[in-house]
Image: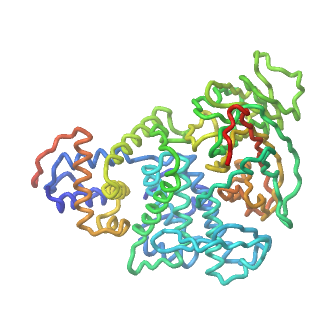
Amino acid sequence: MDDRALDQFLNDLTDGRDNGLHHDVDQGLAHAMVQLRALGQVPLSAPAQQRIDRQVEAAISYLHNQGKDPAMTDTAILTTTLPGFTLNGHVAERGPARVTHSPRLWRCPPALAWLATVALLLVTIGLGSRSFGPFSSGSQHPSTVPAVFAQGGTPTSSTDVQFAMTLPAPVLPAGPLFLWSTMYQIEAGAGVEYPGFAIPDPAAAIVWVQSGKLAIGGDTVLVHRASMDPSSTSPVAGEQLLGPDDAVAVELGPGHSYTIRSVGTEPLVFAEFWIVGGPEPHYPYPAGYNILDYFHMPDAEGLPLPATVTMQLARMTLAPKGALVPEDGDWQVVLTDGLHATSLYRAWPSGEVRSYADQPIPIFVMTATFTPVTATPSAATPQE
Amino acid sequence: MENGNRPNSPNLVALTVGDASDAELVQQAKRCIADFGPLYLRYRDRVYRYCACRLDAGAEAEDATSAVFVKALAGLRNFDDGGTSFRPWLFRIAHNEVTDRHKRRAVRPETSLTTAMDFPDPTSSPEAEAETADALNRLRILLRTLSPRERGVLELRLSDLSTEEIAAVLGISVGSVWTAQSRALAHVRDAMGIASGSATTHV
C-alpha cells in the first residue's frame, strides 16, 4: 500500500480536485473513502441552523457591544469559574472567581473583561460539568430546592402566575435526574401521541398552556385550572381540556402514553417541563411540533433516595439587562418564547438566566422540591 | 461556500463570505469582532458535521457547534495566524470540545445510535430525515471500530482538512497521519465489504 499516493488522493478529494485519474491507490480504499464522505454529509437542518446562528450571533453582538461600552452592566452577576483560554482550544480552569453584583468586572482592563464575558457566554451554552450535591442525605424532611430566588438588586419584576403541583407519582429513583424543558407551538387541529416514544425511566412532567386550547388524553395526575371552566370537558372520554395558564401534571415512563390535540382555532403554544429519573435521554421531537425554545440540564440533581416531586411554575417578566440567579447549589429551568430566546443566556447546570435585551422578556421558570420516599422498616438497611 | 442557499439569521444574512482568505477574514474579525460572521458562515456547517459525527444527539451537536465558535471568539484576539492557519486552529477547538463532552458523559451509559437527529426539519421529509439519520448511524458504527487515532484522522478528513492540518490538530506527524488513514481506510473497506482492488494507473 502506498501511503503517499493515498494521501495525495485524499488531499485532492478534499480540495475537489479529484477526477478519478492519476492515483496509484487501491480502488477499494478510494471507494471506501468516497462512501464514508457520502455518509458524512449530514445536512444542518434549518431549525438547527437557526438555533446555532442565534447563539453565535448573540455572542458576537454581545461581545461587540461589550467592547463599545465596557461599563454597560453594573448589575452583572456572575458566579462561575473563570476559564482561561489557550490557543489549542482547551479551557484552562484558573480557579473560582466569584463576582457578585459588582461593577468591578466591567471596569477591568479590556482583555480581562473580554475573558470574563466569554466565560459567561461559554457557561451559558453548556460548558462545564458539575453535578449538584445530594440533598440532605438521610434527612427525613423534604429536601427543598427553593423557589425562584431573585438576586438583590436584580431588575426582575412581576410574577404573573405561579402554582405548584405535588405529584404523588412517579417515584423518581435515587441517582441523577435529567431536566428537559421545551416550548412548542403546534397548529390548530393537529394531534399527536404524547410523547410518541418509549420512555425507559420514570419521569414527572407538567404541561402548561400559554395560548390556544389543548386536549390531553391519558392518566393525568393533577390538573391546575387558571382559565378554563372545569366543566368544559372534552367530548372525547378521558380527555382534559386546557386553556391559557392551565396546566396538567402527568406521569411518564414505562407503561404510560398520552395524546395531545390542539383543539382551538389558533395555534397551541405550550411548555413542558420533565424531570426524568435516569441518565440523559435522547428523545426525538414529534413531527409537527415547532420548537420555540428549549433548555435541558443533565445531572441537575442527584437523589440519594427515591423521591416524589413538587414542581412549581412561575411566569415572570425579566427586565432589560436583568438576571435571575438561583441560590448557590440550587437550580432553575427557564424558558421564553420564540421571539426572545436569542436574548437569553442560560447557565448550565444552575439555570441562571441573563437578558441582554433592551426590552422586558417574558420567562417561564420551573423549580422543584423533592420529598424522599423512605424505605419500609423491614427493607431498611442499618446505617453505621 | 458552505452555507449554500439556505437562509441565515437576519443579522447574518447581510454578511458575505466572498473569496477572502481565512487570514484576511481573521484580521477583519480581530479589528472588529462584529466581522466574525463571514468566518462563522464559512465553517458553520463543517464544524456541525464534525460535531454531529462524534456526538450522538442533534441537540448536543448544536450546543457543541455553538461552543466551538464562542471559544473561537474568545481566543481570536490572541490567535496568531502568522504560524497557524485558522482552519486547523478551529478544528482543534472542535476536537477538544467533543472530546471534553465525551469525557463528561463517560459516567453515563452509551446512548443509542438511533437518535441521529433530535430536531425535525419542517422543510425536510421524514424519509429524508430517516435516510440522513441512518447514514450518520452507519458512519458512526464504522468509525467506532477504529482506534482513537485512526478515527480522529478520518473524522478530520471527512471535514475536508488536509494532511498537514490534521497533523496540526491532532499534534502528530504527517507520517503518522499517512499511516493512520491508510490503516483506517483498509479497516473501513473491509467492514463495508468492499473488495481490495488493484491500483489504477494513469488512465
Across and down, in percent, residue A89 comes to 48, 69
Residue under the image location 62 percent in, 69 percent down: A119
Residue under the image location 74 percent in, 36 percent down: A207
Across and down, in percent, residue A361 comes to 79, 55
Residue under the image location 67 percent in, 67 percent down: A80
Image position of B202 with respect to A372: above or below? below
The answer to whether one can see residue A270 in this image is: no
Looking at the rendering, which quadrant does residue B142 occupy? top left
Looking at the rendering, which quadrant does residue A237 occupy? top right
Image position of B113 with respect to A136: above or below? above
Image position of B129 with respect to B90: above or below? above
Relative horizontal placement of residue B196, taking residue A186 as reference (left or right): left
Across and down, in percent, residue A25 comes to 16, 53
Please state, as top left, top right, bottom left or bottom right, where the N terminus of chain A lies in the image: bottom left
Q: How is the image coloured?
A: rainbow
Residue placed most toward the observer, A96 or A306: A306
Residue placed most toward the observer, A173 or B78: A173
Across and down, in percent, residue A338 comes to 70, 48
Residue under the image location 27 percent in, 56 percent down: A13
